[in-house]
Image (tube, rainbow, N blue to C red):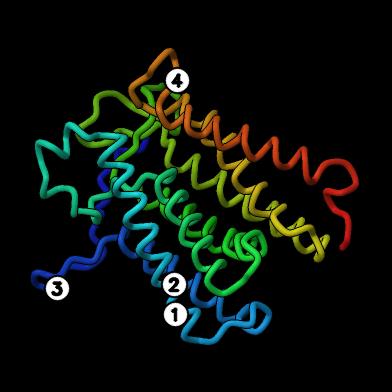
Amino acid sequence: MFIHNLNPTLINIGPLEIRYYGLVYVIGFILLWYVLNKKRKELKLKKKDVEDFVLYLILAVLIGSRLFTVLVWDPVYYIQNPLKIFAVWDGGMAFHGGLIGVIAAVYYFCKKHKLKFLKLADILTFPALFALALGRIANFINGEIVGTVTNVWWCVKFPNYNGCRHPVQLYGAAGRFLLLGFLAIIKDYKKNLKDGFIFWSFVFFMGLGRFFCDFLRADPRIFGLSLGQYLSAIMALVAGYILWKYYKNNELFKRK
């Protein structure tokens, strides 16, 4: 058993508070900016274009993930506590909403600059996965998104929760790091993969992993499944169909 007594705040300087959760977003967006700058010539973009795109992504992630949390995950709580809508540093950023927001921002940017959506989506997958893995670690530090009660030796006693629980946040982080390594190996092995294979593989495995991992998550259930599981199942089914239809058999790794 591990007794959770981690402080979610990294630094306190007077009224200024820097939390691990917020730091993850900063690291994620810096990494995105770095990767896009490395690919700038390949994408035929100017520095200003990259800076604008990173701003689009910041807004897309923050607005999409927060709105999804407020409107879909816990609308009653936020109606009763409207000021908490803006307290993003406390957590509560829904992955599915952030994904929808990012897809919309990437689509808009690609239309504006006449870029291939799937090519850019593949590039963004790697820094996004790394940031998402760090995000789950930050969830663990915050003591949120806890698992179901268990008696396994590695269970965690979270503050304000009864019983010892599965550290599902760390399961999620480990799964995302593994997926990152798996996709990186594939990308290195076949450098000329068909555009979109990396992105749709990301969507498929994220949906599948989240679906099964959430059986150990202490969420409300509807007919035995949580809302997150229904959304993740849709992700996996859609991505699985696209992978099967457009990337099956030898086409999966076929050079252009």
Left or right: where 13 falls relative to 117? left
Left or right: where 24 falls relative to 80? right
Mark 3 in CB contact with mark 1 (< 8 angstroms): no
Between discs 4 and 1, the one toward the N terminus: 1
CA separation in Å, label 3 and label 2: 28 Å
SS at circle 1: helix
Q: Give whichever of 239, 164 is nearer the camera.
A: 239
Residue 214: x, y in percent? Answer: 46, 29
Between discs 3 and 2, the one toward the N terminus: 3
Task: Report the residue marked by disc 3.
Answer: 13
SS at circle 4: loop
Front label number (3 vs 1): 1
Task: Report the residue marked by disc 4.
Answer: 225
Front label number (4 vs 3): 4
Would you identify the image quadrant in which residue 56 lies?
Answer: bottom left
CA separation in Å, label 4 and label 2: 35 Å
